[in-house]
């Protein structure tokens, strides 16, 4: 590693710390990704050899620590214990990323299959390895495509079983969590608008289209097209912003937050 420049040495060290990989594998992954850390993580975790790093017996022990005593699943108490063990707040967005990796069908529940599939894909078979992967999972939120996937996953994960729409309070909580990461300046106005004017459950179409709106329309709405194919709720939101003087003369002013 002495032949590398300081910047590259730092990346190798960071990669080894987060993944637990050897220096040789760290160099291979970083060179394959042109020295981009996030690309190197993707390369590393997509390799088939990762799955061989996990010990099924140890995974079983980990699962049994958290599973509910009365049913073969990990429920709220088990997830709370897992978060305590990881020293992560249960409301931390990284737990949504964990659930996305597990392809969990419902919030606050992991089936044994979901738990095993998710952790094996991440190369986790111990609490120590789980803790080491947390920084990698946080980094995935900065990847545009992965954020999009996690955002869309969150709708199905957070809604009540058997419901097609997402309860408004739950949707607002999820938007505040997700857009705190994405830093969309209009998120608080959007939530206030929904509570004042909508007060109904949120459809999947509105959920998915809002991310597109936040991603493509600037906060001053200068590139918003009233004739575009936005859901009616987003069009009403634009009217609300103009009516309340939040957007004035093509400028976004966050008056209401002062």
Image: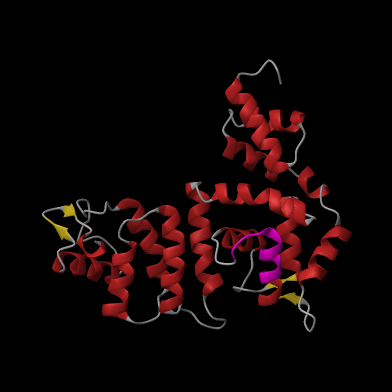
Q: Which quadrant of the figure contains the N terminus?
A: top right
Residue at horizontal 42 percent and vertical 65 percent from the top:
175
Asked if the stretch drawn in magenta spans residue 138, the answer is no
Judge by depth and name the residue closer to the eye, 27 or 43: 27
Answer with left or right where residue 24 lies relative to residue 182: right
Q: Report the magenta residues as a range.
A: 80-89
Q: Which quadrant of the figure contains the C terminus?
A: bottom left
Tell me which corner region of the image, top left, top right, bottom left or bottom right, holds residue 99: bottom right
Q: Is residue 243 above or below residue 219?
A: below
Most prominent secondary structure in the magenta stretch? helix
Q: Residue furthest right?
A: 57
Residue 118 at x, y percent in the picture: 70, 59
Residue at horizontal 60 percent and vertical 21 percent from the top:
6
Query: In this view of the protein, can residue 75 be seen by the observer?
Result: no
Q: Is residue 145 above or below residue 1?
A: below
Residue 198 at x, y percent in the picture: 30, 79
Q: Tell me which colouring the rendered structure shows.
A: secondary structure
Q: Residue furthest top?
A: 3
Residue at horizontal 48 percent and vertical 79 percent from the top:
164
Tell me which corner region of the image, top left, top right, bottom left or bottom right, holds residue 207: bottom left
Query: How many numbered callouts?
Result: 0
Residue at horizontal 39 percent and vertical 59 percent from the top:
211
Q: Is residue 87 above or below residue 51?
A: below
Tell me which corner region of the image, top left, top right, bottom left or bottom right, holds residue 202: bottom left
Residue 184 at x, y percent in the picture: 35, 55
């Amino acid at each position: 590693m002495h032949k590398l420049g300081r910047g590259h040495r730092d990346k190798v060290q960071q990669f080894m710390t987060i993944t637990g990989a050897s220096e040789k594998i760290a160099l291979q992954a970083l060179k394959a990704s042109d020295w981009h850390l996030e690309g190197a993580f993707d390369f590393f975790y997509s390799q088939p050899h990762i799955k061989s790093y996990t010990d099924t017996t140890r995974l079983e022990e980990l699962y049994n620590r958290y599973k509910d005593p009365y049913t073969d699943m990990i429920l709220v108490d088990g997830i709370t214990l897992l978060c305590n063990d990881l020293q992560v707040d249960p409301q931390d967005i990284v737990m949504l990323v964990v659930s996305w990796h597990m392809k969990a069908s419902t919030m606050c529940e992991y089936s044994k299959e979901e738990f095993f599939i998710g952790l094996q894909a991440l190369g986790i078979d111990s609490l120590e390895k789980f803790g080491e992967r947390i920084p990698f999972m946080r980094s995935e939120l900065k990847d545009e495509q992965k954020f999009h996937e996690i955002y869309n996953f969150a709708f199905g994960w957070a809604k009540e079983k058997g419901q097609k729409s997402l309860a408004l309070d739950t949707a607002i909580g999820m938007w505040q969590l997700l857009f705190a990461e994405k830093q969309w300046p209009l998120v608080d106005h959007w939530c206030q608008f929904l509570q004042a004017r909508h007060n109904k459950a949120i459809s999947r179409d509105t959920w998915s289209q809002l991310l597109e709106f936040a991603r493509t329309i600037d906060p001053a709405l200068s590139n918003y097209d009233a004739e575009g194919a936005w859901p009616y709720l987003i069009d009403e939101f634009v009217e609300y912003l103009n009516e309340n003087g939040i957007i004035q003369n093509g400028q976004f002013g966050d008056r209401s937050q002062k």
